[in-house]
Image: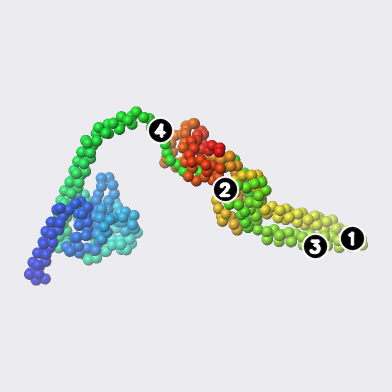
């Protein structure tokens, strides 16, 4: 490059630095952060810039990212940057008081190396602003030459001073506003404190609750099979003998047909052996065996018919059926004894309160809980909009009043 062109480049750099300095002086702290990551590109020609601040006893905090007006702390790129800066700090690759060049090859984490190659160019400059506690992380594809280092040192000095002044100014304004507000409201604060001391406060907590059945009847599957239809809906009132659900009859009727055929075959064999027993000794011996076979097949037939009679499940008493959803059971195979639904008495209900561990408070016998009925399972309780109930000892169950 000729000497005249070098002079022109230097004048351009100097002019840009002066212009940038004029912009930073009246800017606020947030605007200064935006300038630091977005308006240094004509001087350093980077691809990506990130502004970091080291908090006392905390990990690096990302303050600004080039090309992004507001930093979202939960997007993948920001999460990667947090992991990267934490690794740089923990491995001692750079400190918040020095300026150094970084590449992905310096990292001691293979996963971070792959993410670096995915998100960032090859090389980066860790530009420290030691007095203010900030760091500019500048990444670009090409190497950083001597001119880049000279310009970055000038920028570091300028922005370090500006960030320090702006931070102190904001702290003074904030503390001044707080003090002035406290002075103006000190008599109000004193009055509020006196009122607070005059009235005792009770510890309370909000928790979700659900009306559940007290001592409900369990409606279980009486046989192995597939539920073909549900004849009721959740929370429906039923009477004794009302059909609740039915099983698929195909398998049961098939089993009955098979048992009938087997019984007929056994009876035919027994008749034939009885006729032959008059003249054949071996046939006489087979008669007793075939009689046992007939009894066995008859028992199998009666058992199959008994199962068929159980295929329709009815309500054993009046009440309200409780289950989640009809479609949870349609076409579903169940085993003998498996619970399908509950049958509760409308006047025998209780309230189950689910209190999270982090909200747990001491509950004494006779403590009072206020229950607001937003959604109830028992139709008879819909008339109550709010109830005062007592928490029994050793359990988190609230007794609801009878209607």
Q: Marks 1 and 3, how far apart in space?
A: 18 Å
**Location of the C terminus (image quadrant):** top right
Q: Nearer the viewer, mark 1 or mark 2?
A: 2
Sequence-earlier tag: 1 or 3: 3
Sequence-earlier tag: 1 or 2: 2
Considering the numbered disc 1 on the image, is that residue within a helix, a strand or a loop?
loop
Label 2: how many residues lie within 10 Å, few (<14), some (14-19) or many (20+)? many
- Please say if the residues under marks 4 and 3 sit with CB atoms less than 8 Å apart: no
Considering the numbered disc 4 on the image, is that residue within a helix, a strand or a loop?
loop
Residue lying furthest front in this view?
383
Residue 388, numbered circle: none
Q: Marks 4 and 1, how far apart in space?
A: 94 Å
Q: Is residue 114 left or right of residue 253?
A: left
Q: Which residue is mark 1?
A: 277
Q: Which residue is mark 4?
A: 202
In this view, 374 is above or below 99: above
Sequence-earlier tag: 4 or 3: 4
Residue lying furthest right in this view?
279
Q: Marks 1 and 2, how far apart in space?
A: 65 Å
Label 4: how many residues lie within 10 Å, few (<14), some (14-19) or many (20+)? few
Q: Marks 4 and 2, how far apart in space?
A: 37 Å
In which image quadrant can residue 284 be found?
Answer: bottom right
Label 1: how many residues lie within 10 Å, few (<14), some (14-19) or many (20+)? some
Q: Where is residue 311 drawn, in percent x and y?
A: 68, 54
Q: Is residue 6 left or right of residue 69?
A: left
- The residue that appears at 38% across and 30% down in the rendered structure is 200
Q: Where is residue 37 drawn, in percent x and y?
A: 22, 58
- The residue that appears at 40% across and 33% down in the rendered structure is 202
């Amino acid at each position: 490059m000729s000497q005249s062109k070098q002079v022109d480049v230097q004048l351009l750099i100097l002019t840009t630095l002066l212009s940038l300095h004029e912009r930073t002086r009246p800017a606020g702290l947030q605007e200064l952060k935006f300038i630091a990551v977005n308006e240094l590109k004509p001087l350093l020609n980077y691809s990506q810039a990130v502004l970091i601040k080291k908090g006392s006893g905390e990990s690096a905090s990302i303050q600004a990212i080039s090309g992004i007006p507001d930093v979202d702390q939960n997007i993948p790129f920001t999460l990667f940057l947090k992991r990267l800066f934490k690794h740089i700090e923990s491995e001692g690759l750079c400190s918040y008081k020095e300026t150094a060049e970084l590449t992905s090859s310096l990292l001691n984490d293979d996963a971070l190396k792959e993410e670096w190659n995915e998100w960032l160019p090859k090389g980066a400059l860790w530009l420290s602003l030691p007095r203010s506690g900030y760091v500019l992380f500048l990444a670009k594809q090409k190497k950083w030459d001597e001119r880049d280092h000279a310009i970055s040192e000038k920028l570091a000095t300028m922005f370090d001073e500006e960030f320090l002044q702006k931070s102190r100014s904001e702290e003074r304004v904030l503390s001044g506003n707080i003090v002035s507000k406290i002075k103006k409201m000190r008599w109000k604060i004193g009055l509020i404190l006196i009122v607070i001391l005059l009235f005792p406060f009770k510890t309370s907590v909000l928790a979700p609750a659900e009306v559940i059945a007290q001592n409900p009847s369990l409606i279980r599957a009486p046989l192995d099979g597939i539920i073909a239809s549900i004849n009721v809906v959740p929370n429906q009132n039923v009477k004794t003998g009302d059909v609740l659900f039915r099983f698929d009859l195909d398998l049961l009727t098939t089993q009955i047909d098979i048992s009938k055929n087997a019984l007929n075959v056994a009876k035919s064999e027994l008749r034939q052996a009885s006729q032959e027993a008059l003249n054949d000794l071996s046939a006489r011996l087979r008669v007793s065996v075939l009689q046992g076979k007939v009894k066995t097949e008859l028992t199998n037939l009666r058992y199959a018919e008994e199962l068929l009679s159980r295929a329709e499940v009815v309500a054993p008493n009046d009440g309200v059926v409780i289950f989640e959803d009809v479609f949870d059971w349609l076409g579903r195979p169940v085993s003998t004894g498996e619970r399908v639904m509950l049958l509760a008495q409308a006047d025998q209900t209780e309230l189950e309160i689910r209190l999270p561990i982090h909200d747990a408070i001491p509950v004494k016998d006779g403590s009072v809980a206020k229950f607001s009925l937003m959604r109830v399972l028992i139709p008879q309780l819909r008339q109550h909009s709010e109830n005062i109930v007592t928490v029994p000892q050793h359990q988190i169950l609230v007794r609801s009043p009878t209607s």
